[in-house]
Image (tube, coloured by chain):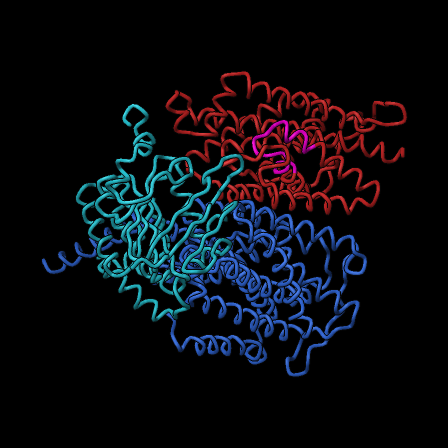
Amino acid sequence: MKKWSAPLWFLAVGILLGLVPWLRTVLGFPIFYLIFLYFIFFWVAQAISWNILTGYSGYFSFGTGAFFGVGVYTMATLIDKYDFNFLSALPIGGILAMLLGLGIGFVVFRLRQLKGELFALLTLAVDFVLAAVVRNTDSIDGGFGVRLGSVQPPAFLGSFSTMMYILSLVIALITVFIAYSIYYSRFGLGLFAIRDDEEVAEGLGVPTFRYKMTVFSISCFLIGVSGALHALQIGYITVEGTFALRVPLFVILMSVLGGRQHWFGPVIGAVVIYTLTDTFSQASIEYLNQIIIGSLLIVMILFLREGIFERLRRRFWPSFGLLLIVLAAQLAFGIGGRLISQTAYAMLITIAFLLISDNGYARLTRSIQFLQAKKQVGVSDV
Amino acid sequence: MSDLMLACNNVVKDFGGVRALAGVNARVSQGEILGLVGPNGSGKSTLINVITGLHEPTAGRLIFQGRDITADEPHLITQLGIARTYQVPRPFNTMTVLENVMVSATFGHSNLGLDQARVDAREALEFTGLAAYAEAPVGKLNLHQRKFLELARALSTKPQLLLLDEVMAGLNPTEIDQSVAMIRKVYESGVTIVIVEHLMRVVTSLSTRMIILNYGRVIADGQPEQVMRDPEVIIAYLGKDYA
Amino acid sequence: MLLIGQALISGILLGGLYAILAIGLSLTWGMLKIINLAHFALTFLAAYFTYQISTSFGLDPFFTIIVTAPVFFGIGVLLQWFFETFDVSEFNSLLITFGLFIIIQSVMTGIWTADYRRIDFDINPYAQQSFWIGEFALPIPQFSAFMAALILAGLTIYVLNRTYAGKALRAISQDRDMAAAFGVNYRKMAMLLSGVSTAYAAVAGVFIAMIFALFPEAGVEWIGVIFAVVILGGLANVPGALGAGLLIGIVQAVTSAVSSPGMAPLVTFTLLILALLFKPEGLFTRRMSL
């Protein structure tokens, strides 16, 4: 249920996380962790934005790449060719992505016969078209790529890494807050109705066209802003890297894994997947990373289509405990590599635990309770 | 009592090469229960879909309480006061029973906030006897209960005209009697009803007036007893030999 | 003029290759309601197979079809068995095959690395040889692919319309239960169709290995084009797939020649978007009335 205190919680989380860069100057842990968290926030923003459209309204989009690309290239072009201030370029990236979305939506959402798969393929096609357009437009990229020089952060934000960290944190927080707000709002109820049965929803008074356009715009705007910021992180921007299937794939998997039906699902998914990716991303085994990602997607669709979030809630303490135990074991025995990798392995094992069906889990807990009861009987006998 | 509520003027609907409605002329007056009857394929469901805005007619006009709704979007038509139920119930599967009705309560009438919508939704569930199932997922309801859920959703939009599309399909005799009683209850609360139905005994006992469709045309229009004795109607249903 | 003419010829020949790929995808999508993104990865896996077998054993690439096609037929059968066992819906098949695509691509990267791989010209002399019609060159691999497309399309059309198996397939795609009532075993027919579809993909892969240099991500570039062909041609519409393949091949080649190679995907995907919007059942299919 929506609580009036929610904005305060978000603020609290924001402030806590915002203190991390300061903590780094005090405790001195490597800058790597700051960058790691930047990426976590980036993926959270991307996955949540995607889910606001796809999870809430049921319109499955393969086109994250297109809107992400608009954001990236807006930032790249404005800074590189027009000497724009990068902070003002951020919202512009979002607005342009939103306009693209509005344009697509205006044509597409009017058509009744556009089934789910066709919308998905259409958004994929938009991604390819946009890539081709950008590749052929010399004033944007022209196939040469764009190399962004270093950007001067404003004084109060400290170093570049700190600035990126703070900005991505703010964007992620706002994005998640928007997802949360929509989830408990009248607008959200209408979206869920559209997802479940659009024709019936329209017949019951939901203004489906208007709502679809609105949610699509919001989603595209957020993806664009996040992408615009990310351009600064990438540094050297190419068409292939930007419009590749990597971003849509990750975003889809993160939401599928975390759970598409709850506002918080993609956050979990983003944290897990990125941690796993980072672990397996050493150059020599990058392909192993892809294999795990692909397999996870298949396993989730087959066995836990609604994602791990609901089950995690129900089995929270056992899961959390398992995670800590596996992590602690690795630390104790000195195995598993760096802290991030150790966390990744612990997460994998916890996911495996969550994949146990509800029936299986019930049997497990019953047998544990049975064993406990037996022990008690044994004690009282003495 | 005899104010004109809905007028269908020469409504034609083509789907590609098939003419589903071939010029339907019909009137619904306030305060009546109009039975809409006809053999399979006569265009009953198409007419309902056209009235509620799902399809735009190829020709002809639809006037509801003086307003031309021919080209209006479905959600607007609902808000103006026309509601419908589906022959095969189509609940929102990821929501609870209460949430299902909240959707129609908040969107189907005027723009109600969620809190007021929750109150209205509970009222609608009370009316249809489903109050006990409010927090249950819809998967738990049987067919009869789902049909009542359809009804609750439609009622929560505070309609003046309710279109019932084959509510009795798939129900056993007890459930049919309960449904008839419920429909009477709805009627008594002041809602004008159009009931599409195959089950003759139900339609003739409930309706204050009947319209028979055949091949997309109205072939009879009047009191149940006289309409059922109309030779053309008999031919349409049973063939020439019985006329 | 010579340029355009040559572009036309190249486009038609390439279109044949597109058609081979599109027919398989179109059939499984239209008849089995499986949207198989892995189709592309399997094509390139077959291409890498061809490369490997040719290179390791010095075999003429044409002959590798004898090995590759049956192997991939088996893979296709296995894939459909998998979908049947887990009762996968149409939309979920898209996601699952997406995952498979990624996995297969990673496996290919793992085995063959990201370096470009091309069959040596002494094993594959065809890549440099052409038939000539007047001033116009018809490169042998492309020409063979085109002929193969015609043969396979013709064969498929014949089987679908004139044989019992074909009729059974068309029946199950329209009404699975009804077909079962007439004694058609859905499972068997579906696995058969899937096997054939993947075998076609393998054939395409063999030709791709003869024409192009291979790299693991190559499949991605084909996804858009082949989907464009499938949708423009109409689901499960074999002559449509052939026609659309040729059309797209020509469009691409002519665009490349007249404007620039980079514009070709732009035109193709714009066509696809228009097709999805205005004629989702395909250019070559009659719109079904109510």
Chain B, colour shown: cyan
Q: Which residues are magenta?
A: C229-245
Is C35 or C116 nearer to us in this picture? C35
Q: Is residue C214 in the magenta section?
A: no
Task: Give residue C205's position: percent from left, percent from top.
Answer: 66, 31
A258 lies above or below A5: above
> Can residue A167 be seen here?
yes
Q: Main secondary structure of the magenta part?
A: helix
Query: Total label count?
Result: 0
The quadrant the C terminus of chain A occupies is bottom left
The residue positioned 49% from the left and 56% from the top of the image is B72
Task: State the residue in front, C225 or A173.
Answer: C225
Q: Nearer the viewer, residue B27 or C198?
A: B27
Residue at 41% in and 49% down: A304
Question: In the image, is residue B139 above or below residue C119?
Answer: below
User: Residue A68: percent from the left, percent from the top?
Assistant: 63, 60
Q: Colour of chain C?
A: red
Q: Quadrant of residue B67?
A: bottom left
C233 within the magenta span: yes
Q: Position of residue A334 (x, y in %)?
A: 48, 60
Question: In the rendered picture, chain A carries what hue?
Answer: blue
Q: Position of residue B121 (x, y in %)?
A: 31, 63
Residue A171 image-quadrant placement? bottom right
Relative to residue B152, is residue C179 drawn left or right?
Answer: right
